[in-house]
Image (cartoon, grey):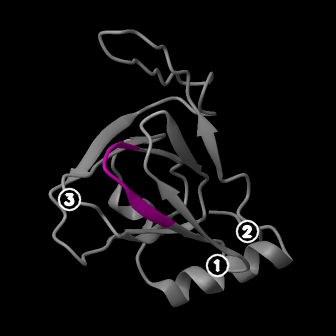
Amino acid sequence: MKLNGANIIQLSKNYDRRGNLSVVEEFSNIPFKIKRTYWIYDVPGGECRGGHAYRHNEEFIVALSGSFDVILDSGDERKVYSLNRSYYGLYVPKGIWRQMENFSTNSLALILASIPFDPNDYIYDYQAFRELSTLKSTKPVLY
């Protein structure tokens, strides 16, 4: 299974002498309805966030301030996305392992999610994720 549509999406950038403004709209910039919003900040140097995949949740990740890397892994393909502009976001489809690292000082990550928090949606074990991703690439899997 490839990265299944994961990609950087450029948001509108409305220039103004008083400061710029960008917008995210569900089903316009991102392909899902926003059900949850959260942010990650004050990450100590050298720490990572994420380290899991979702069965159903899709995400859109924006570096509102500072920079960080998002590593996406489908089981077949792995790619690093560096986020460092508040008018670019990363769409992460369901079924993709994701980890965030290399947070700069005072970085702020905004994450928009397609479902409310559900602890049963998370896959924390990488080997279990690999086994599921192998099954997905060979035959349909019902969840």
Kindly identify the amino acid type of the residue bearing the numbered disc 3. Thr
Q: Is residue 92 left or right of residue 37?
A: right
Q: Earlier in the sequence, mark 2 or mark 1?
A: 1
For the point 56% across and 80% down, which residue is it? 129
Q: Position of residue 59 (x, y in %)?
A: 49, 47
Q: Are marks 2 and 1 in contact (CB under 8 Å)?
A: yes
The N terminus is located in which quarter? bottom right
Where residue 2 appears, x then y in whole percent? 76, 68
The residue carrying mark 3 is 105
Closer to the camera in the image, 126 or 109: 109
- Placement of 59 over or under 78, stated as above or below: above
> Which residue corresponds to the image point at 29% horizontal and 10% vertical from the top-left?
18
Q: Residue at x 73, y 68 (%)?
A: 141
- Decide which of 10, 29 is in the foreground and name it: 10
Q: Is residue 38 left or right of residue 111?
A: left
Marking on residue 66 = none
The residue that mark 1 highlights is 132
Task: Check if residue 66 falls in the magenta segment.
Answer: yes
Near mark 2 (Cα within 10 A), the count class, few <14, some 14-19 or many ≥20, is few
**For the view shown, which residue lies furthest in the right direction?**
138
Amino acid type of the residue tagged 2 in the rendering: Val
Residue position for label 2: 141
Q: Quadrant of residue 47?
A: bottom left
Which mark's residue is nearer the viewer, 1 or 3?
Answer: 3
Total numbered labels placed on residues in the image:
3
Left or right: 84 in relation to 131: left
Q: Which residues are magenta?
A: 63-70
Q: Are marks 1 and 3 in contact (CB under 8 Å)?
A: no
